[in-house]
Image (cartoon, rainbow, N blue to C red):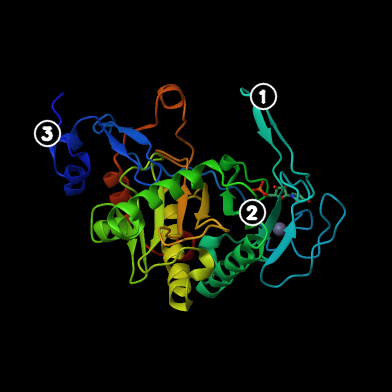
Amino acid sequence: MSDGAARPESIGVRGDAALLRSSHRRRNALTGEWVLVSPGRTKRPWQGAVADVDSEPLPAYDPDCYLCPGNVRANGETNADYGTTFVFTNDFAALRPDVAVERVDDGLLRAETEPGTCRVVCFSPRHDLTLARMSPDEVRTVIDLWAEQTVELGRTFRWVQVFENRGEMMGASNPHPHGQIWAGGALPLEPSKEDATQRGYHSAVGRRLLADYAAREAGGPRVVVETDEWLVVVPYWAVWPFETLVVPRRPAARLPDLDDAQRNGLADTLLVLLARYDNLFQTMFPYSMGWHGAPFADESTDHWTVHAHFYPPLLRSATVRKFMVGYELLAEPQRDITPEEAAARLAALSAEHYLDRR
Ligand code: H2U
Ligand code: ZN
């Protein structure tokens, strides 16, 4: 194949090329991985089904919840009678600090111990809330907590992973609004790919990859929320149907680098994004979300831009999820609805949560 005309990046960004109407592959600029996009495979009409999957409204306090204030957890410890947020070390932690450094390597099989720690972060004392339904000030408090925890754990560990699994479909064990933070000595797979691509881009062109990406996306067809400080897009290379990327418009390498205006702007931005997510199928939209920022103990962070990924599993309704199976598991990820279609659907939704409109 002659490659003279094949510059998918530049063609794709214009968004109107014949290439984009045919099955094509897009490259994830942050990981270097590819995704197969098959537009037109879902010619069936959009159902926008509203499934009645959210059961009874939850109580503000649940005596049996292990995250509610003052309650006793599975290991017998009692939660503080907290009024805003609450952090504790995970009683069933996957990573523990007290591991001796050991390695095995026989030339074929390798292993190394991984010291670390796992924490649980309660976003609110209210059992019945979700981030989507908290006030901007309450969300700002959560953002500050994420930033503080990142600083504290970054003194000991190279990688601090702030994340939230929301909804049973994503394996969340409890509806009480909460997230987790895992920190460890190694740079895990996903951030190490992102570190390499951002470093490579920065040394090639002298600018931050995600700053250039945000500038290129602003005002474009993949935007879901756009404010002075933040941009939320369904990324050009999105794998999950309604995946989004949350990027600051001014430089910041890590959560703690965000200034006051950026943090307040982030609270507002997250609330709009989460309202649109919940409004899409009028359900508590499940997702895994998490923050990626510059690793600790590295000399330079100039190439990094802190950002959040939202990976929601839902495809066509509150109950129909996308499975990563078959071709996706064995060859590479594939999607039917294009990132542009997904973004248009999300952007068209009200920024007000459907439960607040009732
Ligand atoms: P998920 O809902 O995302 O699984 O997070 C809840 C975490 O809370 C989970 O990792 C921990 C679980 O280990 N947990 C405790 O640390 N103590 C408890 O009493 C129950 C759950
Ligand atoms: Zn609770």
Q: Name the residue under label 1.
A: 106
| Circle 2: element type | strand
Dots 1, 2 in contact, CB < 8 A: no
Q: Which residue is found at the position 51% from the left and 51% from the top? A: 289
Q: Which amino acid does label 2 sit on?
A: Gln
> Could you tell me how far apart the alpha carbons at marks 2 and 3 are, in whole angstroms?
48 Å
- Tell me: residue 263, above or below residue 120: below
| Circle 3: element type | loop
The residue furthest bottom is 260
Q: Is mark 3 within 8 Å of ligand 1?
A: no
Q: What residue type is labelled 1?
A: Asp
Residue 152 x, y percent position in the rendering: 66, 65
Residue 336 occupies quadrant: top left
> Could you tell me how far apart the alpha carbons at marks 1 and 2 are, in whole angstroms?
35 Å
Q: Name the residue under label 2.
A: 180
The residue furthest right is 76
